[in-house]
Amino acid sequence: MRGFVGKGPKRVARLDHFLVRAVSRQPQGDHDVFFRRLSAAATKGKLWFGIAGIMAAFPGKPRRAAVHGLLALGVASGVTNVIFKRALPRTRPRPEHLPLFRFVNPQPTSSSMPSGHSASAVAFAVGTGIVSPALGIALAPIAAGVAYSRVHTGAHWPSDVVLGSALGAGAALVTRKWWPARPPEPTPRRTPVEAPAIHDGEGLSIAVNVMGGSYTPETGELLRGVFPKAHIQEIAEGEDIAAEMEAAATRPGTVALGVWGGDGTVGTAAAAAVEHSLPLLVLPGGTLNHFARDLGTSSIDDAVDAVTKGHAATVDLGHVVMQRGLPDVPETTELAMLNTASVGVYPNLVRRRERLQPALGKPLAGLAASLRTFGVNSPTTLTVNGVKHKLWILYLGRGRFYPRDHAPLRRPVLDDGVLDVRMITADEPFARLRLLWAVVTGTVAASKVTHLTEATTITVEAVGEPLVLAVDGEPKPGVRRATFAVKPRELRVYSPLPAD
């Protein structure tokens, strides 16, 4: 059996010798030096680690492609060297098969079958290409050169290279199954809608929440300088924000409602704008301004540009009906939802991530925050559309958010008509260990504890103790039941982003 495996099937062996003789007849030249150096550079993955380091310097898809390529390389290298080289012992080509000036020195002593260099090269190129096809195509000639160099330098028979390449491609495809490439993120898109162009603020009524994170005594003067003819209504601490927003929206002569504050204040303004058929101008003035960021009005200049040109877009509005208080006598509250709602540890995760981000950057801050949050917190028991779950996170986004994992950041389209539903459950065996491993390896989206779906309505009910439900960053304690729905294109908002 050993002799049969060592020589290989007769036809393969004859083809190997035929191809090696063809290589041996090539005249000596600079290409010999090139392939020898290329082969040496790829030894122990040095070439691929170097390329991955360059790719990792560029955030986004190049960095993810580098990580995926190295993961595929690691799997291919382990399978090739630990399993197949032991299972398929084979003698490497001898000096009589190729000119001595071509032989790699020293020649490896491990089994010739299969080629580990080829497996690693193809695995890295294919693994990279799964995430970024353009980078995969660019790396393909280098990987092919490394694979051929092993025959050119007498380190392997051609069939060794073929099997090694097949193992490398297979390893990359296997990693794709449990670490799939992220779906492409759509280009920001807006659906244009008519809204009055406002100059100097005439006809604009602006409600300013003085408890907003960026409010100072000079805020009112700043807005009066930008919109000298606007009505500016400051909402003091302790005042009813909804009532004050209603007063601003119904002021005589108002053709558009403006709001300065965080996401919670903006949500209240959105409900008033819809009720009175007014376009909404969002001015970023709170601690969190996620909606303004998604709109493209993350600065005063952006907002002014949109409202003076009359550029506006339609936006879906989330509608939340909550039941709170005693079970026998529930109190029903209705809210508008612009961004997100969540149950569980998601608010803690976001707060930790944003606190760490200035020092660590987004990727490391997200990793550190996730490990801390999931390591020390306990899951919550509730029902989602009548199905009981133990959950670390129930996240509901008004519209599709990206990336498609446990820490979404961006929302390119604001009127897609869906709720983005993400659950990280503790229903599975060893759920905490599964989740922590997924966080470390960056595979949360593909983990069995993660469930990503979309819906137009969803109902959440507490099991036992009432829930704390966060809506647009505002905690709502004592919630026993909440129903979420989407009202398509309900709101008109000034936005400077061009519409497709």
Image (spheres, grey):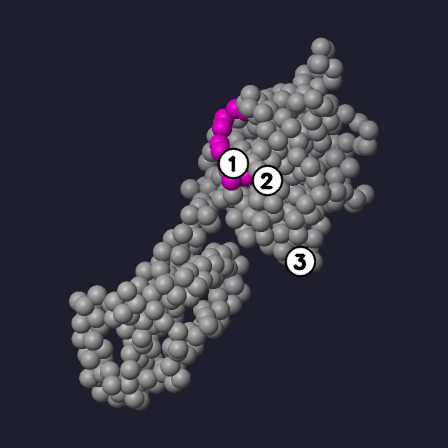
Q: Which amino acid does label 3 sit on?
A: Leu
Q: Residue at x 49, y 56 (%)?
A: 64
Q: How far apart are marks 1 and 3 (CA)?
A: 28 Å
Task: Say whether disc 2 or disc 3 marks the residue closer to the N-terminus.
Answer: 3
Give the label, 1 or 2, closer to the camera.
2
How far across and how far down the image is residue 178, in percent? 46, 48
Q: How crowded is mark 1: few (under 14 residues within 10 Å), some or many (20 or more)?
A: some
Name of the residue lying farthest toward the front: 1
x and y, in percent, of residue 346 in the image: 65, 39
Q: Which residue is drawn at 71% across and 14% down?
A: 327
The amino acid type of the residue labelled 1 equals His
Check if residue 494 falls in the magenta segment.
no
Instruction: Say which mark, if any, is on residue 451.
Output: 1
The disc labelled 2 sits on which kind of residue?
Ala
Task: Find numbered disc 2 in the image and state the secondary structure of the residue it sits on.
Answer: helix
Q: Distance between the residues labelled 1 and 2?
A: 13 Å
Magenta stretch, residue numbers: 448-458
Q: Which mark is residue 360?
A: 3
Q: Distance between the residues labelled 2 and 3?
A: 27 Å
